Image (tube, grey):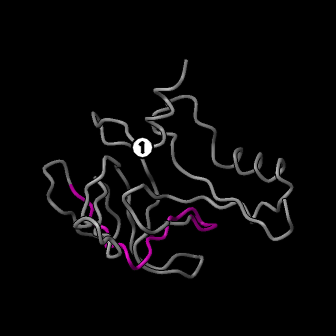
């Protein structure tokens, strides 16, 4: 690829239990195959319903941009407060104009608050999984339905 290019990847692994490629192997494959430095291979966490991208820093945190107001919910859909919490990921997208902008996803996340070693502060997602029993949709769900 042209010097200065970067590659962004993310998502789609939740429905491929046991088949997922670990992050480091995928990043190395992309770096080697496309002949770009590994620091130019970035991972993002997002979904169709969010108008912003959450990038993973070098310390493994997906830093939530200020245009997204995250809310973590328990199994009864009660908001959870704290600096290190786990639950269903919900958010208010302040950039949404064609819908109310508040969604509760089927993702089960760990969200932390505070200053990261990378220098950014605020909410960040450090673990992402799927809520037990939730239907798999999105990129991974579409791809798994296409497998022979």
Residue at screen point 25% across, 64% down: 99
Q: Give the range drawn in magenta.
A: 56-73
x%, y% of residue 84?
35, 65
Taking 75 as reference, is 49 above or below it?
below
Observer-nearest of 40 and 148: 148
Residue at screen point 84% across, 59% down: 1
Residue ID for mark 1: 138
- Rendered image quadrant of residue 89: bottom left
Q: Does the magenta-highlighted stretch encompass residue 88?
A: no
x%, y% of residue 32?
84, 49
- Point out the image quarter for the C terminus: top right
x%, y% of residue 3?
86, 68
Residue at screen point 78% across, 66% down: 5
Q: In this view, does 50 lie to the left or right of 135?
A: right
- Rendered image quadrant of residue 137: top left
Residue at screen point 78% across, 60% down: 38
Q: Does the magenta-highlighted stretch encompass residue 57?
A: yes
């Amino acid at each position: 690829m042209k010097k200065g290019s970067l590659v962004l990847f993310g998502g789609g692994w939740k429905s491929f239990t046991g088949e997922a490629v670990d992050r480091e192997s995928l990043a190395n494959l992309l770096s080697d195959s496309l002949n770009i430095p590994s620091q130019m291979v970035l991972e993002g966490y997002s979904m169709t319903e969010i108008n912003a991208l959450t990038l993973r820093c070098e310390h493994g945190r997906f830093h939530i941009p200020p245009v997204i107001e995250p809310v973590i919910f328990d199994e009864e859909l009660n908001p959870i407060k704290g600096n290190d919490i786990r639950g269903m990921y919900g958010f208010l997208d302040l950039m949404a104009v064609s819908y109310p902008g508040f969604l509760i996803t089927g993702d089960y996340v760990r969200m932390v608050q505070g200053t990261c070693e990378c220098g950014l502060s605020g909410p960040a997602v450090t673990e992402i999984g799927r809520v037990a029993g939730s239907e798999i949709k999105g990129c991974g769900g579409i791809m798994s339905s296409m497998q022979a």
